[in-house]
Amino acid sequence: MTHSQTVEPALGAKAPRILTEIPGPKSRALVAAEAANLAPGVQSISTLSGLAMARGQGSVLEDVDGNRFLDLAAGICVNALGHAHPRYRKILQDQLDDLTVGSFTTEHRAKGLAKVASHTPPGLDKIQLYSGGTEAVEAAMRLAKSATKKYEFLSFWGGFHGKSAGTLSLIGDGTKNGLGPSMPGTFHAPYADCYRCPLGMTYPSCGVACAEFADQVIRHSSTGALAAILIEPIQGTAGNIVPPPEYLPAIQSIARHHGALLIADEMITGFGRTGRWFGVEHSGVVPDVITIGKGLGAGFPVSGLVSTDAITRSAPWGLPSGSSSSYGGNPLAGAAVHASVSVIEEDGLVDNAARVGEWMLGRFREMQERHPFIGHVQGKGLLIGLELVKDRQTREPLDRKVCRHVFQECLKRGLIGMVYSPHVRVNPALSIDQATAETALGILDEVFTQLGREGHWR
Ligand SMILES: Cc1ncc(COP(=O)(O)O)c(C=O)c1O
């Protein structure tokens, strides 16, 4: 039996609800008090909003002034189940009472890992748990070195994999500026971002030339020691960029040709986000390693990697204490994994993501016909990207200050979304129902209509 949870719970019936100016007086006071001790650099969505939150339910967040917002950001894809899912809360509360520390096997961890392995591609059934995304990707890099006895990595422009020393070298955006030097043996190739083709070509007549280009990067830059190619099946941080279907298979054959592993970083795309359990399923590729997180724990900080029995036995990674960490897979993490994956299964959230995502994509395409600054709409499931532009011909991105105006106008109407950049990312909880999605997109449409009338986006 499925316990359909896709009907939004109590708070949702009264959302959005705006009672004060935004941010309200209690938010302003609390944010100012915390600012005395909070270091800068917190996620933009939090800093730009100036909100202090009190609680959440489903796709609704309530701030300390009692204002209620529809949430299209979902903790940047962490919130798979919707805020405060009752069965998730129950499992974690019980675990808190029983045991919280240690690496011993627990019932929840054993059951949770079995559930994860029942959804991963064939052969990928050995899992190690960590606490954050970057830590899991670092572990995948160590695993690739252990398995291949090589040490170089290829990754992609626009890719994001974390902010620790190794992953920082592999990301393809400006986050690493000023934090050099990069790790030796790291190379980057352009990603298949067809709207902004880095090679200036057009799909499909390009023949996916960017994949061939990646092969050329390896041939020209590598010392013949490529351990792995690291790739997001859909690039999240870059703006929810969906590559053409031939791309990932082509990258996999390049990895094989060079005797390297293929690591799919599914931190964002895993656990139903794209309308399938894993993003790689859209292309049929079975990678050697998948890194997981975000929806895996649905709020509890647990990440991990999944690979084959043979690969994970590689030394030193697979030796006793070789792949472990202090908190990875502790009893609370095990409970969170078991709870999250069980709810995704029981509530049919993968199908819900596919269904509501398809509807949202259609609604955005309809908006695109009316709003000239929506240059491009793309997405899979509940991972949708819009490219806001000044001019559809030149595709010049919309000014950030205009995007921030859109963000603030949405907030005033009770909508929280990642619309503060020209690469808009829409990724609500997997449990969002269509009525809630309709209300949320209605608000965005209203703000876009106002922007069109004001005309200052040009
Ligand atoms: C694809 C991908 N990999 C890795 C990370 C790093 O995760 P964390 O911020 O938990 O270190 C992120 C974070 O957004 C991500 O999107």
Image (tube, rainbow, N blue to C red):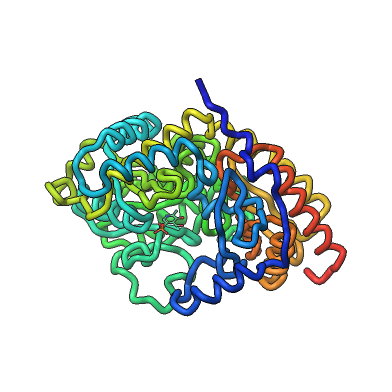
Farthest-out residue, right = 453
In the image, residue 59 lies at what x, y percent?
60, 46
Farthest-out residue, left = 320
Which residue is rendered at x = 31% and y = 31% of the image?
111
In the image, residue 403 lies at what x, y percent?
69, 66
Q: Is residue 434 visible?
A: yes
Q: Nearer the viewer, residue 379 or 212?
A: 379
Ligand 1 sits in quadrant: bottom left
In the image, residue 375 lies at what x, y percent?
72, 57
Residue 23 position by quadrant = bottom right
Which residue is rendered at x = 66% and y = 44% of the image?
12
351 lies left or right of 397: left
Examine the rendered structure and indicate whether residue 306 appears above or below residue 157.
Answer: above
Examine the rendered structure and indicate whether residue 217 appears above or below residue 342.
Answer: below
Which residue is rendered at x = 36% and y = 47% of the image?
291
Examine the rendered structure and indicate whether residue 206 appears above or below residue 219.
Answer: above
Q: Report the quarter where the C terminus lies.
A: bottom right
